[in-house]
Amino acid sequence: MGWMHDTLQYLQQDPVHRVYHHNEITFSILYAWSENFMLPLSHDEVVHGKGQLVNKFPGDRWQKLATLRALYGFMWAHPGKKLLFMGSEFAQNDEWNESAGLQWYLTEFAEHSGVQKVISRLNSIYKAKPALWQKDTNPEGFSWLVGDDGASNVVAFTRWSDDGTPLVCITNFSPVPHDSYQLPLPTAGVWREILNTDDLAFGGSGITNESFAVDVDTDLKRIFRVPPLATVWLERV
């Protein structure tokens, strides 16, 4: 059924049950190189009683919005071009209605402007970091770091540019933070966060990481703070 169906099917599960659906969030990589794909979150998913994206997810209001921000971070890092239907960029509450305008007034509220800021930040980084798009149709542009940790609801992978520059994406689809997560890194060096959807500026809880160094003596692993329902991007500096 494709990336959109599988991803939304996974995220509509209660987080405690996502362990049993982990393949739905990883399966798309198995066929990602067979065509030049788009990753749509289209109007088909926000009409005819299906509800807006933010209202599809379980949890309280904060968890729904955090899940949406995490999804966007995961989506922008995933191979494939992005397609987001209007209104989703600020977490519109109501379904799309062709007879009415968008609920732009919602951007006056912090929880909605936070989602809008995430989209702005994602687009800015996406434009500046070739690792996120240069090898979209080449399997050499992607490598798993964590693909099988369904118990923690965590996935992590590296995107690679043509010149071998890595960008790491870590997503935690659990409402539980992981304060001491053993995160493997693709190369030695100094790493820093360039995106964290749990940032206070976006409406998150503010769990972030300082820049850190990884060397070969550590087996390229780092004890990492993974925020709840969030996506973090790392770059090597």
Image: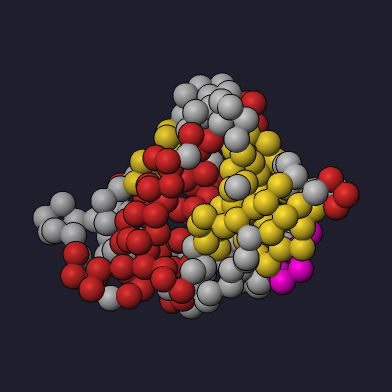
Q: Residue at x 77, y 63 (%)?
A: 223
Q: Residue at x 20, y 65 (%)?
A: 103
Q: Specify the farthest residue to the right.
A: 217
Number of numbered discs: 0
Q: Specify the farthest residue to the left.
A: 99
Q: Is 180 within the magenta?
A: yes
**Stretch in magenta:** 178-182
Closer to us: 51 or 81: 81
Residue 34 located left or right of residue 222? left
Q: Is residue 126 above or below residue 73?
A: above
Q: Residue 35, how many percent across, how many down?
A: 51, 22
Q: Is residue 69 above or below residue 62?
A: above
Residue 145 located left or right of residue 77? right
Closer to us: 217 or 149: 217
Residue 147 located left or right of residue 8? right
Rendering colour mode: secondary structure
Q: Residue 167, how many percent across, how many down?
A: 59, 43
Q: Residue at x 76, y 68 (%)?
A: 180
